[in-house]
Amino acid sequence: MEFIQSAELPPPAGHYSQAVAAGGLVFLSGILPARADVDPAVAGFEAQCASVFDQCEKVLRAAGCGFGGVVQCTAYLVGVEHWPAFNACYTGVFGDHRPARAVVPVPALHHGFLVEVQLVAQRP
């Protein structure tokens, strides 16, 4: 088992790893928008999605992976009305690649954010 920390991102504030690699797979913890760059009181849903996927890319890169190796995505959205905007952002990130996916509407997320993404990727 390997614990992964992107040098491009600050370490997690809680007792967890950004990602853990095991058995040829990389498991990314739930990733919220970057608090240093995105104010949830001001930033719209699309900006929050862009921040989340930017951070996901950095963690995947630290693990030797990319979005093309993602096999599963779980997304937590505050408000089901954000589903179409999430689909648009997701399609922009993944293009023709279609990982397995679950989208879970939730009543609230930490720090007042509207989106959190958790990924599983296969190492090349």
Image: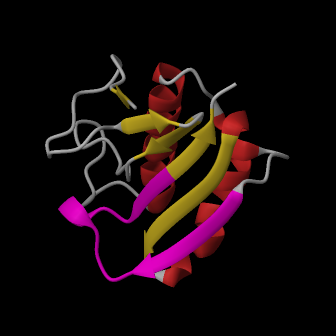
Image position, residue 6 (x, y; %): 36, 23
Which residue is found at the position 52% from the left and 82% from the top? 80
Is residue 71 rendered magenta in the image? no
Image position, residue 22 (x, y; %): 49, 36
Could you say which is closer to the camera, residue 47 or residue 74?
A: 74
Could you say which is closer to the camera, residue 17 or residue 48?
A: 17
Is residue 105 rendered magenta in the image? yes
Task: Examine the image and state in which quarter residue 36 appears.
Answer: top left
Which residue is found at the position 25% from the left and 50% from the top? 39
Residue reaching furthest right?
96
Q: Is residue 39 left or right of residue 4?
A: left
Check the picture and name the quadrant holding the N terminus.
top left
Q: Is residue 7 left or right of residue 27?
A: left
Which residue is found at the position 72% from the left and 45% from the top? 94
- Asked whether residue 6 is in view, the answer is yes
Q: Is residue 23 left or right of residue 11?
A: right
What residue range appears in magenta? 100-118
Image position, residue 100 (x, y; %): 70, 61
Q: Is residue 65 left or right of residue 41?
A: right
Residue reaching furthest top?
7
Image position, residue 11 (x, y; %): 21, 30
